[in-house]
Image: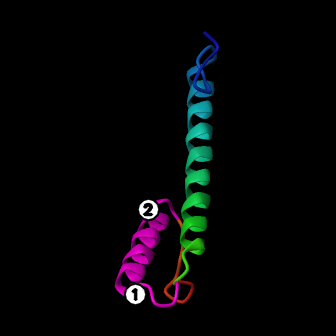
Amino acid sequence: MAAVQGVKMDGTAAETWTSLTDLQDARMDLGLIAAERALDSIKYAEGADITAHFKEMRTAWAKADRQGAVITDEKF
């Protein structure tokens, strides 16, 4: 048994732990990038429901924040 979903299982405990944390870090980085892109892609269409737009923005901001994004009020 060499690997389980990318986790090295045939080495030392330290090697297994390193491969596990490397995999988790990569997934978190991808989640962060996706969350930031989702927030950046939200655009208000003139005449649309502004309240719904603000809600969508706040939801996307919260998701990006949970993924570790540092989004200041000024950038938001």
* SS at badge 1: helix
- Residue 11 coordinates in the image, percent (x, y): 64, 17
- Residue 30 coordinates in the image, percent (x, y): 61, 52
Closer to us: mark 1 or mark 2? 1
In this orientation, which residue lies closer to the viewer: 24 or 30?
30
Amino acid type indicated by mark 1: Ile
* SS at badge 2: helix
Q: Is residue 36 above or below residue 1?
A: below
Q: Quadrant of residue 56?
A: bottom left
Amino acid type indicated by mark 2: Arg
Q: For residue 50, which numbered disc appears in the image? A: 1
Is 55 within the magenta? yes
Q: For residue 15, which numbered disc appears in the image? A: none
**Main SS class of the magenta portion in the image:** helix
Q: Is residue 37 above or below residue 51?
A: above
Image quadrant holding the N terminus, namely top right
Q: Earlier in the sequence, mark 1 or mark 2?
A: 1
In this orientation, which residue lies closer to the viewer: 19 or 49?
49
State the residue at coordinates (62%, 39%): 22
**Which stretch did the figure color magenta?**
45-68
Q: For residue 66, which numbered disc appears in the image? A: 2
- Residue 55 coordinates in the image, percent (x, y): 36, 77
- Residue 34 coordinates in the image, percent (x, y): 58, 58
Q: CA distance from mark 1 to mark 2?
A: 24 Å
Is 72 within the magenta? no
Horizontal side of residue 34 vs 62, given as left or right? right
Q: Residues within 10 Å of mark 1 (few under 14, many from 20)?
A: few
Horizontal side of residue 56 vs 25, given as left or right? left
